[in-house]
Image: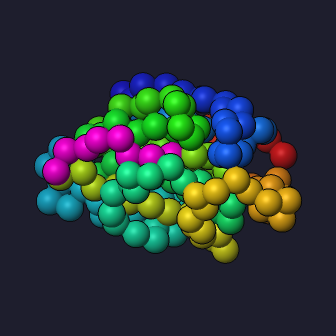
Amino acid sequence: MPAPVQALLLKRNDWVPNNPRLPVLIYPQAIELKGSDDPAALFEQTFSANGWPPQWRYGVYDFHHYHTEGHEVLGVAAGHAQLMLGGPDGHVVPVSAGDVLLLPAGTGHCNLSCSDDFLVVGAYPPGQHADICREAPDREQLDSIAKLTFPQTDPVQGAQGAVGQYWRE
């Protein structure tokens, strides 16, 4: 049985806005990967089934950045990493294959170190996407973060998932 979802509410950190209302959700060992020839496909299937169309397979950039035009779910398909959430001097979060992170728009994230096989599947709610922001947000970007629509379902747990519990409009 997977561990309970962890919620991490991040305050603004220097130039990184984070999200003042919505916590990061961490789903430890959310997807069972044993015996899979293509573990990334398991994340893609799960995210798709829950209304979060997968957009890419890659890693996490090794520089601090955030997004203003999309809430982002990251499924760790292979390997392990140390990610920093919240911007410089933020929270170090170890992740490994099977873990999922749900980052509300504005959340700073950066790959501090990772295994050679580190692979992530990224997805966004319909109509949302990742812009790459590496500087302090302007008023328009802050408004975009504040007005971004809530996803209809949790990317991992569906209609009755943690998004409904922790992210309330």
Residue 14 position in % (x across, y down)? 68, 39
Residue drawn at (60%, 68%) of the image: 131
The answer to if 17 sits in the magenta stretch is no
Q: Is residue 47 above or below residue 154?
A: below
Say which residue appears at 53% left-offset and 37% top-offset: 88
Q: Is 149 displayed left or right of 128 in the figure?
A: right
How many numbered markers are drawn? 0
Q: As displayed, is residue 138 above or below residue 25?
A: below
Check the image and report above or below for 45 versus 155.
below
> Which span is picked out in magenta?
109-116
- Nearest the viewer among 70 and 62 is 62
Q: Quadrant of residue 66?
A: bottom right
Image position of 154 (left or right of 27): right
The residue sitting at 24% across, 51% down in the picture is 118
Expressed as whole percent of the image width and height from the top left, the position of residue 85 reads 52, 38
Residue 127 in picture, x, y percent from top left: 67, 74
Q: Quadrant of the N terminus?
A: top left
Residue 128 in view: yes
Residue at 29% x, 60% y is 40
**5 with respect to 69 (left or right):** left
Residue 99 falls left or right of residue 126? left
Residue 22 visible to the viewer: no
